[in-house]
Image: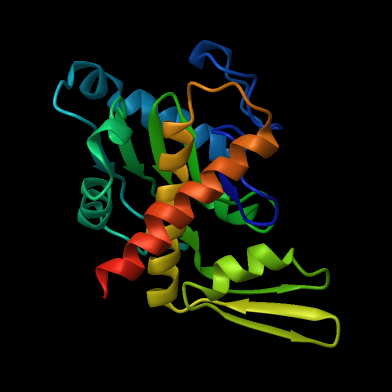
Amino acid sequence: MRNLKSKRMHGIKASAYSESKYSNWTRFSPVDSEIDRIYNKYYEQIKSSTNGPCFFEEKTHSSFIVPVSLQDLKNEYSKIPGTVRAGLKAVFILGGTSKIQSTSKTNFRYGTYWNNCIFIHPYPKNLMEQRYTKSPRPHILNDYRRVGAEVKLSNNCVSIRFTESALREFYLRDVFIHEMGHHVDRFFKKNNAKSEGFAEWFATEYGFRLRYFENK
């Protein structure tokens, strides 16, 4: 799971869920509540599907932008080897809510993996340009740079500015593939740091490097 300021964790946010089973979820944020609501909304369709993952898209709230389409995600998904993709139940593009927007600076996620499903979160418009007095770690800044985001460091302040095209690349090459990495790694019991390390590697191999060789 990719958070805005912290590193991603394996499918859950430590402060957001009681672990593992759906019946044991404990919601602590509007983000978790939206995942809960949307999963319930489509549960019967997911349960009855036998032809690979279902793809769903919610209407986007006016305070957010969705930089990718369902077709974009289907295209990326099709490039991943079948043995790796096996078992994925659904991919969601969420719509966002006013409550999520109001807490976006402290409680935003790009993506979440849970219960063999990937949830892609819409991007808050008010975060197209972000400023930090404490710089994110260098490898996080490199994640932004390699998709075309503008990163400026000056006077102990770091600014990161997305264009829509850069944000699209970021979601396709990093966010979505990273969450697929959690799906691949789901059978291995690891601590959060090791799980995140694998998902980062997977995003690099199947997101960025695959894209590089496609363009050769």
178 vs 69, nearest the viewer? 178
Q: Is residue 97 left or right of residue 42?
A: right
Residue 4, x across and y down, in percent: 63, 56
Q: Name which residue lies at 31% across and 46% down.
A: 58
Residue 54 in which image quadrant: top left
Colour scheme: rainbow
Q: Name which residue lies at 39% across and 46% down.
A: 94
Residue 183, x across and y down, in percent: 43, 32
160 vs 29, nearest the viewer? 160
Q: How many marks?
A: 0
Residue 118 in which image quadrant: top left
Q: Is residue 44 left or right of residue 1?
A: left
Residue 184, x across and y down, in percent: 42, 33
Outermost residue toward the right? 156
Q: Name which residue lies at 48% across and 31% down.
A: 185
112 vs 33, nearest the viewer? 112
